[in-house]
Amino acid sequence: MELTGLIIALLGAALAIIICGIGSSIGVGTVGRAANGVLSEDPEKFGIMLLLVALPGTQGIYGFLTGFLVIIKLGILGGKIAHISVSQGYQILLSCLPITISGIFSAIHQGKVCAAGISVAAKHPEASMRAMIYGALVETYAVLGLVASIFLLMGIKVS
């Protein structure tokens, strides 16, 4: 078994999980700070704020899903680890890049958009879903990165 290819492939999985997790942490932290400011004045708005705070956390889930798909492709969970060449390892690593890159940037910017949405929801609770739509638009690019990574991973043959 070529361990170098396996290590390169696992690096792709690790980067997807770690980098998307970092982006989600920053995004959720940004919105959470804004929401806590509102809640200090009006704790009854918790339900309205919760969805906006949670939204940037999805990129971390997408990165985790991509990493999990790599682990399954490599056969690590099944007990029969695939033979991965260095070339295949790089293919898997590169397949993880769409979600890795789109995940970190979309999570951070989604956090900023949702933090602005917190201000809207604080002053006009009836408009909070409209503010969430803006945050969801940023999410589109993370979803596209996830789909691209999944399609690229599906195209790699391992044995």
Image: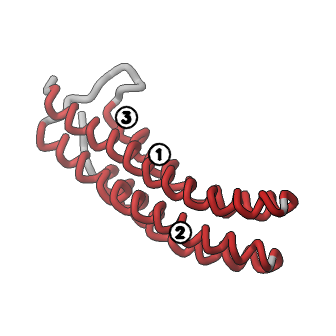
Disc 1 residue type (three-letter): Leu
Q: Please state if 34 lies on the left or on the right of 141 as rendered.
A: right
Q: Secondary structure at mark 3?
A: helix
Q: Secondary structure at mark 1?
A: helix
Q: Please state if 71 lies on the left or on the right of 108 as rendered.
A: left
Q: Please state if 132 lies on the left or on the right of 109 as rendered.
A: right
In this figure, what is the number of numbered marks? 3
Label 3 – label 2 distance at C-alpha: 32 Å
User: Vertically, is 146 above or below 9?
Assistant: below
- Residue 132 is situated, as x and y percent measured from the top left of the image, at 66, 72
Q: Quadrant of residue 129?
A: bottom right
- Which mark, by number, is residue 71? 3
Observer-nearest of 110 and 72? 110
Is residue 111 in view? Answer: yes
The residue indicated by pointer 2 is: 112
Disc 3 residue type (three-letter): Ile
Observer-nearest of 10 and 24? 24
Residue at 23 percent of width and 52 percent of height: 94
The residue indicated by pointer 1 is: 65
Disc 2 residue type (three-letter): Lys
Task: Point out the image quarter for the N terminus.
Answer: top left
- Which mark, by number, is residue 35? none
Residue at 32 percent of width and 44 percent of height: 15
Can you name the residue that lies furthest to the top here?
79
